[in-house]
Amino acid sequence: MASEREKIGWNFDDSYAQLPDIFFTDTDPTPVQSPELIIFNQPLAVELGLNAEELENKNGAAVFAGNQIPEGARPLAQAYAGHQFGHFTKLGDGRAILLGEQITPKGERVDIQLKGPGRTPYSRGGDGRAALGPMLREYIISEAMHALGIPTTRSLAVVTTGEPVYRERTLPGAILTRLASSHVRVGTFQYAAKWGTVEELRALADYALHRHYPDAETGENRYLTLLQEVIKRQAGLVAKWQLVGFIHGVMNTDNMTISGETIDYGPCAFMDTYDPATVFSSIDTQGRYAYGNQPYIAGWNLARFAETLLPLLHDEQEQAVKLAQDEISKYMKLYQNHWLSGMRVKLGIFNEEKEDKILVQELLTMMEKYKADYTNTFRSLSIEKPEDTVVFKTPEFKQWYEKWQARLGRQQEPKTSSLQLMRSSNPAVIPRNHRVETALEAAVDQEDYSVMERLLNVLSSPYAHSPEQDEYCKLPEQPAQPYRTYCGT
């Protein structure tokens, strides 16, 4: 008889558990009453080397609920710290348990984590559970981000638990199965720097290098290279966020990964009307994590990461600080280069000219002044329908449009190539807030998952620019109140 490992395809390893004990606590999920698998990412399961058909039955529901531990798994909760809205605090996986690392058929190592499986030693008085709505929200947004080509954690499954969770009101409970290249965060390093020894910090840094940057392991100063590589990854990541109008909502240091993946989709949302001051999170009352602030907050977080590495960068404190400062000072230029390069692509520009940034800024200034929709403005330019934008009839647009066309005319590539380039980088559809809310309401209040399934199908091909997507490009009616998102605890 085939073992569970052979039958389902589990191929677990536990490299994180080989780190010093300070970084985790072995923790089993708390079983739930009657788990039911309500959404399952079959293509992703196949990529992982799993037997999707086996997991879609009751056995899959039991595993994704934490009722049944897969063969080879070693459940644990990770310890970390973080600056939350600028204030440092001790954290840890309060409602997440890492089952282990699945080794895929391609030899890739992927964390498989349950979000909402019960209390851990780091729960700090919380119940360790999660409500259905926020778990579905993370499933939708993370998979949409993946389709947009943005590094992100992925979602494999959501199960309902058959048990209520108690927040402002009673809600149906659920557990999300999340995948990541790893869950090592800036906050993990902050935890080690604050409460660990230098050797424990070194063990974590060596682990991060081996797992994410193996080519840097043998460098002259491998810890300096680790800092450089994380800065590069984050500069590229945040630029991608800005280019599609994504607002993370809670860029605490514990929500910044060493791998450069987007993680934790609590109060996140996509911007409709272009406005750098846009904030959706109900708890971000000061606008710390507004759309326009995201590049600067990333730089601030990276400076906190650099501080943790000081004991490893150089034996002399003064020299270590100088090395760290030199690297952090390069971040903003790296980000701006990524952003401007991406904006050139969004406008069909293949080469570089000195005045390109001004061309981009003039368009964005127009969009802000006339409250233009960010996604649809670039989409309209990509499909040669500028008349569909609210800026079309403004006095500034004609002058800008002529300047843009002249810019395109100064490059060797024909206009057809520019349009193709634009369509490949300007999404026709994003997870618009009103569409996400409609899907969540249908699922949570009526147990109707068909609305969400249709939305996921549309979001899976954001650059298709197909007629079927037109309905999902429409803007909502002007709401009476500004849209607000919540952390989803």
Image (spheres, helix red, strand yellow):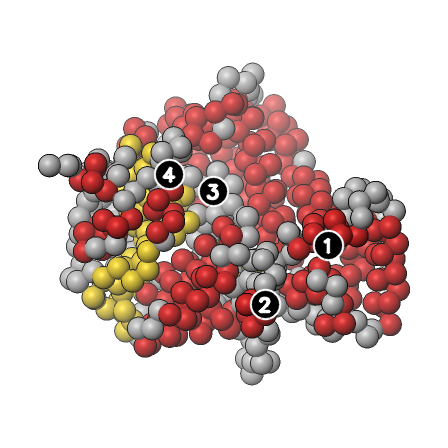
Q: At numbered mark 4, what does the secondary structure look like: helix, strand or loop?
A: strand
Determine whether label 2 and label 3 are within 8 Å by CB.
no
Query: In the rendered image, which residue does mark 1 sit on?
Result: 419
Task: Tell me the amino acid under the disc marked 4.
Answer: Val
Relative to residue 159, is residue 232 depicted above or below?
A: above
Query: In the rendered image, which residue does mark 3 sit on?
Result: 257
Query: In the rendered image, which residue does mark 2 sit on?
Result: 467
Q: Name the image quarter holding residue 369.
A: bottom right
Measured as percent of width and height from the top left, residue 461 is found at 53, 56
Determine whether label 4 and label 2 are within 8 Å by CB.
no
Task: Tell me the amino acid under the disc marked 1.
Answer: Leu
Q: Residues within 10 Å of mark 3 (few under 14, many from 20)?
A: many
Task: Tell me the amino acid under the disc marked 3.
Answer: Thr
Determine whether label 2 and label 1 are within 8 Å by CB.
no
Nearest to the eye among marks 3 and 1: give it: 1
Q: What is the distance, in whole Å, between disc 2 and disc 3 at their CAs?
A: 37 Å
Q: Residues within 10 Å of mark 1 (few under 14, many from 20)?
A: some
Q: At numbered mark 3, what does the secondary structure look like: helix, strand or loop?
A: loop
Measured as percent of width and height from the top left, residue 98 is found at 30, 43
Label 1 vs 4, first from the N-terminus: 4
